[in-house]
Amino acid sequence: MRSIGGERAVRAKPRKFLVVDDHPLVRHGFALSVGEIHPDAQIIEAGSLTEALEVAARVPDLTLVLFDLSLADRQGRDGLRRMVDALAGVPLLVISGSDEVADIVDSVRMGAKGYILKTSSTAVLEHAISLALTGETFLPLPRAVLSGNVAADTARPTGQILDRLTDRQRDVFQLLLAGHSNKEIARELGVLEGTVKVHVRAIMQKLGVRNRTQVAVVAARAGCFPEEV
């Protein structure tokens, strides 16, 4: 039936966000922030992986999920992998207090559409959600890096980043991305730890970054992940 004066516009379905964190105050804080960003959205909270998987099965039209990387009832990376599989394409953003290289890289490699530090502002959260909803990936790349030449380099294919490294630097680069310490890299490659430090500094200089976390972020943005063993 047409209404008087023309056809009434069809109301879009409200967006549904799932916030998963086993700390009630943190979870509720993120839920409030998402509610400020999307006032008309429905916010669902879950305090465990089990609850989150139940919600995913019960609510097939979720818009986006914020997922704590350190839930009490998950086993290592398996919890994130199970959640991504259960969502079947629904974007997931990891929320975490860790800025460890391995956590950032592994999260993206397992299907997360972004990685948000729990110390981030609401503006950062809004930007991350916006990117994820358009199919892009958000990573906590520091402003200092974005203001330099690395911003353009992050869009380059993996090969172009690796082309700038020597063969030995590539070996160090792969082990660095996998989260190994300088001592572990030295033992793996059969070289002195001081030699590894030199290679790590050279890699950072070539990528235009200042620490290991920034190396991982640049690599992940370019689709470069640790080689599977």
Image (tube, grey):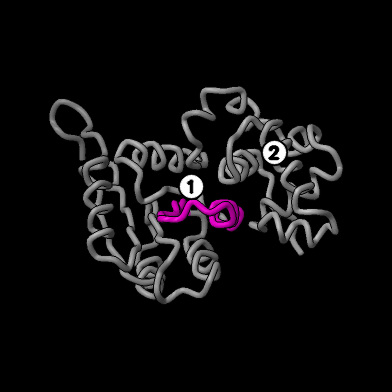
- Residue that mark 2 sits on: 201
| Drawn side of residue 38 relative to residue 90, left or right | left
- Residue that mark 1 sits on: 114
Residue in the picture at 76% in, 64% down:
229
Q: Which residues are magenta?
A: 90-110
- Relative to 133, residue 155 above or below: above
Location of residue 4 in the rendering, given as x and y in whole percent from the top left corner: 13, 30
Q: What distance separates the C-alpha of mark 1 from that of mark 2?
A: 27 Å
Say which of marks 1 and 2 sits in front.
2
Residue 34 appears in view: yes
In terms of depth relative to the viewer, which is nearer, 207 or 56? Answer: 207
| Drawn side of residue 145 relative to residue 96, left or right | right
Q: Quadrant of the N terminus?
A: top left
Amino acid type, residue under disc 2 in the picture: Arg
In terms of depth relative to the viewer, which is nearer, 50 or 206? Answer: 206
Q: Earlier in the sequence, mark 1 or mark 2?
A: 1
Residue in the picture at 26% in, 42% down:
38
Residue in the picture at 40% in, 66% down:
56
Location of residue 15 in the rendering, given as x and y in whole percent from the top left corner: 31, 48
Q: Which element is circle 2 on? A: helix
Q: Are marks 1 and 2 in contact (CB under 8 Å)?
A: no
Q: Residue 136 shows which numbered tag? A: none
Amino acid type, residue under disc 1 in the picture: Gly
